[in-house]
Amino acid sequence: MKRPFSLSCLAIAMGVCSFSAFAADTQQPTPVPTAEPFESTILTTDLAFPWDMVWGPDNYLWVTERQGKRITRVNPTTGEKQVVATLDKVHVGPQHEGVLGLALAPDFLKDGSSNYLYTSYTYMDGKDEHTRIVRLQYDPQTQTVKDGSETTLIEGLPAGDDHNAGRLRFGPDDKLYYTIGEQGHNQGVNFCKHIEAQRLPTAAELAKHDYVSYAGKSLRLNTDGTVPADNPVINGVKSHVFTYGHRNPQGLVFINGVPFSSEQGPSSDDEINILVAGGNYGWPHVAGFQDDQGYVYANYSAAKNCPSLKFDANYIPKGVPIQKESDWKTPANFQPPIKTFYTVRSGYNFADKKCGDLSYLCWATIAPSSITYYPKDGKIKAWSNSLLITSLKNGALYRVPLDADMKGVQGDESKYFHSANRYRVSVVDPDTSKIYIATDTAGNVLDENGNPTQKVSNPGSILVFEYKGN
């Protein structure tokens, strides 16, 4: 196994760095640029599209590998990897399918615990693709999941080749929370499919365990997969649905018991939201704030002869019905975001020639892939009480300070650790001096100079950024 690759940046300015490399192999990993007072290392490589990552009570990093069909423990000091479970029923696709979210039971590895862990993955049911959430039982003696312990909590959830979201977390109420994207409908190869994010489940559907309406939602579940008794009643029906009207909410974190989510916008208006039970977050009628700026809802699925049209996210062909944000009759339960990346004026130029065929990389978004919290009493004083958001598009970590009440943002975001990588998920170690970031194995990204590239610098890796200041 490769030894961690170490580098230290001795200059304040980003990119003006002196690197020192130490690796066992002749082909050394690409250095990761950073700036004082941080030092970066490459902890481990050769992960098969890491997707979720949590810090376990055993002081190991627990990682799902989306295309690897497995859950892996990683030693945060040596980078040594150990496969905990391989899930043979997983359906893997090129972009969004495979093993997704991961959550460890609140009593995991405590005396008397059943040592349950929970994960989600996509699977095929005949010709149809779905997602299921399962429970596994870990054996501390073998350090693997027990054979035959996989138990399905819920299945038949919406899944497809785009925007599955898939973040799985325990709340302080010991309930499981899960995010599901809108499946990429009304865009790309799915542009003629209707967006279901505003559709709510009916009692008849729930009686048949038909969860087609769960696309574009966040869910709240008991640990046996049933509907909690105190879930919100929405449109006269109580279901697993906690919130709705989402696009692709890949990030989820609890702060003082409150769920915060990061959500990918279309060509602008990535969002940070506080999830409120029964809340409607507006998609597809609203992206970001309801301000008629930079976004209109072009409903391709309602266009005549939709398959004959050429999809364009920003320059809409004739015949596609258009709705301004202000034309939507805003419901009382509409919840605007607490921040966007980024709200732009109407008439914004989305056709930046610099990005060519990868034009979406130049849009006013960062493609947030996860959200975590840096605590008030952390060692990095300047980061106290902040949200940390990873970016798939810019290969960077964004820090957003919260106000004292932790109910809104306070000030502008700051950008750190930019490299030619797709940052998938971050974890703060319990000591609060290290930030671990897992990277995608492949994909398109803006490099350190802001130019589009299809070659990532550190594929399938975990990078470590350690604070060295006082």
Image (spheres, helix red, strand yellow):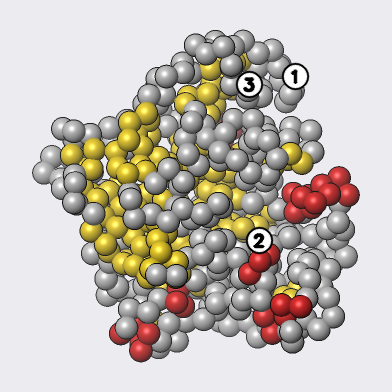
Q: Earlier in the sequence, mark 1 or mark 2?
A: 1
Q: Which residue is mark 3?
A: 31
Task: Using the rendered view, name the quadrant where residue 349 is placed.
Answer: bottom right
Q: Which residue is mark 1?
A: 16
Element carrying mark 3: loop
Q: Is residue 454 left or right of residue 92?
A: right
Q: How far, Cα to Cα, is label 3 from label 2?
A: 31 Å
- What residue type is disc 1 on? Val
Furthest residue in direction front, as rendered: 126
Q: Which mark is residue 265?
A: 2
- The location of residue 116, given as percent across then percent down, is 22, 49
Query: Which of pointers 1 and 3 indicates the residue nearer the eye?
Result: 3
Residue located at (63% from left, 23% from top): 30
- The location of residue 106, given as percent across then percent down, is 26, 48
Of 29 and 179, the residue lying toward us: 29
- The location of residue 433, given as percent across then percent down, is 48, 26
- The location of residue 196, given as percent across then percent down, is 55, 77
